[in-house]
Image (cartoon, helix red, strand yellow):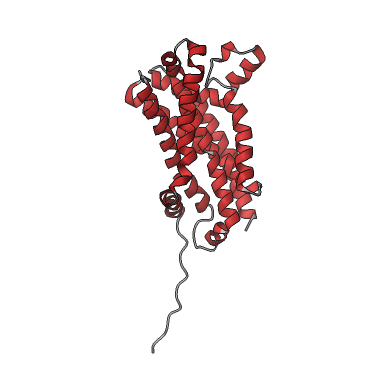
Amino acid sequence: MTVLDAEAPARPAGPVSASLTYARRSLLKIKHVPEQLGDVIGIPILFTLLFTYLFGGAVSGSTHDYLQYLLPGTLALAVVFVTIYSGVTLNRDLTTGAFDRFRSMPNWRPAPIVGALIGDVGRYLLAAGLVLGLGFLMGYRAHGGVLGVLFAVGLVVLFASALSWAWTTLGLLLRTPTAVMNLGFVILFPVTFVSNVFVAPDTMPGWLRNVAEANPISHLVTAARDLMDGTPAGHQAILVIGTAAVLIAVFAPLTTLLYQRRE
């Protein structure tokens, strides 16, 4: 007797394999639409050149001395600003219906979001590489050596990856990609500029100095400076890692909850 077996239903892809598949999709989007890298390339170059030559002479007396202070800050600043595009990309996929197709596939539900965030690490590394490459061409010297630079980049990318969860939450709450981008810049500009990226907090008025010293961006920049200068960065690095853990603990579940409610 011949029995036609019913086709077995497709088994859902596991969390790791599904997330890596969507990470590959994110990277392929960059390959096929390279113009979306315009901001990733433009922001680091603009920040490094503009602030070095605009403020260098006034702040430190020479652009070379100021570059030694500024570059770790622009490294953090450029990568942090690029994180906004995690929320923008998610919102765009939602508005175009791409996530409706993803939900119909037999895979781990959060995989499209997790995979996209993994793929975004490529953007962060590109932005960091551009800042460092340009800085070295302009005369920056990393006294912490290659390891110091690598640890600084790793810490910045870790913080950026955690912060990107906040933008995915906004991407699910707001209606358009433009709204996500605009609100992201409105939030980041004061947060990053009231920090120690451009000037030391002890040059600020007392109340503003307290805000700048408590700013997580200041902790990130200080840790990056210490690592690249070859000085101990343990306390600041711990604060950065702790902040990253809090961001993930708050916004990853919130993003997942909002995403599931859209189903």
Front one among 124 and 215 = 124
Residue 95 visible in the snapshot: yes
Between 151 and 41, which is closer to the camera in this rendering? Answer: 41
- Most extreme residue toward the top is 61
Residue 237 falls left or right of residue 230: right
Q: Residue at x 60, y 39 (%)?
A: 250
Side of 162 where 263 appears, left or right: right
Q: Is residue 231 above or below residue 151?
A: above
Furthest residue toward left: 146
Q: Indicate the position of residue 217 as horizontal and vertical percent values.
A: 54, 26
Could you tell me which residue is drawn at 62 percent across and 43 percent down?
180
Residue 165 in the image: above or below residue 151: below
Name the one closer to the observer, 117 or 197: 197
Q: Quadrant of residue 211?
A: top right
Q: Position of residue 170 (x, y in %)?
A: 62, 43
| 112 on left or right of 211 | left
Residue at image position (41%, 37%) is: 126
The structure residue drawn at horizontal position 46% and vertical position 78%, both measured from the top left corner, is 6
**Where in the figure is residue 174, as x and y percent of width and height?**
65, 46
**How many marks overall?**
0
| Residue 51 on image: x %, y % | 50, 22
Asked whether residue 233 is in view, the answer is no
Q: Quadrant of the N terminus?
A: bottom left
Residue 144 falls in image quadrant? top left
| Quarter that holds the C terminus | bottom right
Task: Report whether 225 appears left or right of 109.
Answer: left
